[in-house]
Amino acid sequence: MQRLFLGLLLISTSLMAKTGPDFDQYFVNKTMRVDYYFTGIKGETTISLDQIKEEPVWAGSMTNLIDTLNYGNHKVEIFDINTNTLIFSKGFSSLFQEWQTTDEAAAGIYRTISASVLIPFPKKPIKFVHYSRNSNGAFEAEFETEIDPDSRFIRRDKPQFNYKVKSYINNGSPSEKVDILLLPEGYTKKELRKFRDDVKHFMTVLFEAPPFNEYKDRFNVRYLEVPSEESGIDNPRTGVFVKSAFELSYNSFDSDRYVLAFDNKRIRDIAANAPYDQLYFIVNSDKYGGGGIYNLYSTCYSHDAKEENAWWPDYVFVHEFGHAFGGLADEYYTSQVAYNEFYPLDVEPWEPNVTPNTDPETIKWKSFIDADTPVPTPWEKQLFDNIPYKNQDERYQLLRKQEYWGKVGAYEGSGYVSEGQYRPYLDCKMFSKSLVNFCPVCQNSIVRVIKFYTEE
């Protein structure tokens, strides 16, 4: 029955109507990059404009210009000034928003973090409005400015780094496909052959995973061969610091396995050599780690130090892309993270796969739940919690013995919270460290995003 529900919902998304105005009326086929700064602490944000750059070809959809997904902790809206017409919008999340949930931000220590938004290059003056979600989960305007596309203050220099763009998968025009740009981190010039092998490996892994296997023809994949001076990346907890191309580091937000980059403008300047919707860093390291932030970028280590864990990078690669591309939340709750109250129990998260709501009539994945499946859905959670985290196989076997294994329901324990948050499936790529597939609800979210980028 749940496959029928999935099919019905996917069919409904395929009927998505064009969103937004005619592209050629308001835009030219180039990108406007708006760089700005977030500054603040927990509960306090100041946004200031940094610079505006003209970049080559627009990679996003020319048909679906108004974001109807409602994903992300932020969004921007672009208005034609002359008519006050909404002509473009996009949701995304940021490093700054994640940092605001850390102990450092709660302690009142201010930080400034750079961010960028890519929009199609307008023909006429626009109003640019940035929104962030408030404590109730609703968007509130935080910053706005007017931009004249003919302004002499817009930087129009060509991309300053002359790295060759290599195509791995080419299925058509960037505006009609999802464009992934893979970037090497911590590979020296002599190690770039290994990077090419890693590209081949991880693209095989990604496009064997449902639902990507069914939509491979809707993707383009490119990569840039950007060498690092030294091999590997920073690992502050062991005192290791290297000269890598993008300065990615372990221990981001003081979480040992979290790999992020903070030199936003350098990343964007290099990536401008190619059209992209999604950036993915493959990190030349054998230490477990990665990261993924919605519509920002993904990171994943390339190989594991232990032979028995050789499959772990494959899991991480697809899992992190679930965050950055599919807008999916982490569903696990027994692994240590750096966040405080990331998902408050009195607010409905925007992510499609976590909720505090256990009303069977209003739960957001109601259409996936069989009539005979109770909500909330019982499972042996206490037994599961008593199994050490390192014993993943034992945990997996317990999940498979549950009465509602293979059924969409509302299972307590999700979003870093043991009680009060629920996930739709007992096990999923977003829940456990395993090669299990995405659950039906997560797959549906990914398909919605694919179709938003690629359908008229």
Image (cartoon, grey):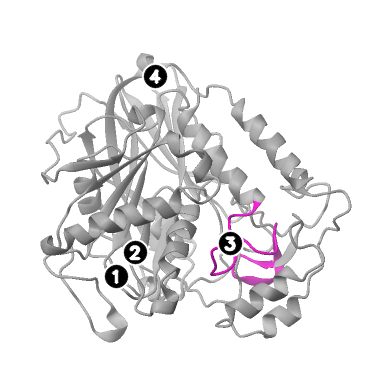
Sequence-wise first label, 4 or 2: 4
Write down the residue under mark 4.
23
Q: Secondary structure at mark 1?
A: loop
Mark 1 surroundings within 10 Å by alpha-carbon count, few (fewer than 14), some (14 through 19), many (20 or more): many
Please name the residue that numbered disc 2 is placed on: 260
Name the residue located 72 percent from the left edge and 69 percent from the top edge.
400
Residue 157 sits above or below residue 318 on the image? above
Query: Which numbered marker is on residue 249?
Result: 1
Q: Earlier in the sequence, mark 3 or mark 1?
A: 1
Relative to residue 3, is residue 196 drawn left or right? Answer: left
Residue 245: percent from left, percent from top? 18, 61
Q: Are marks 2 and 1 in contact (CB under 8 Å)?
A: yes
Give the percent coordinates (x, y) of residue 159.
14, 40
Give the mark, 1 or 4, whose residue is nearer the N terminus. Answer: 4
Cα–Cα span, label 2 and label 1: 6 Å
Q: CA distance from mark 1 to mark 4?
A: 39 Å
Name the kind of residue labelled 1 in the image.
Answer: Ser
* Residue 418 lies within the magenta run: yes
Q: Amino acid at mark 2?
A: Leu
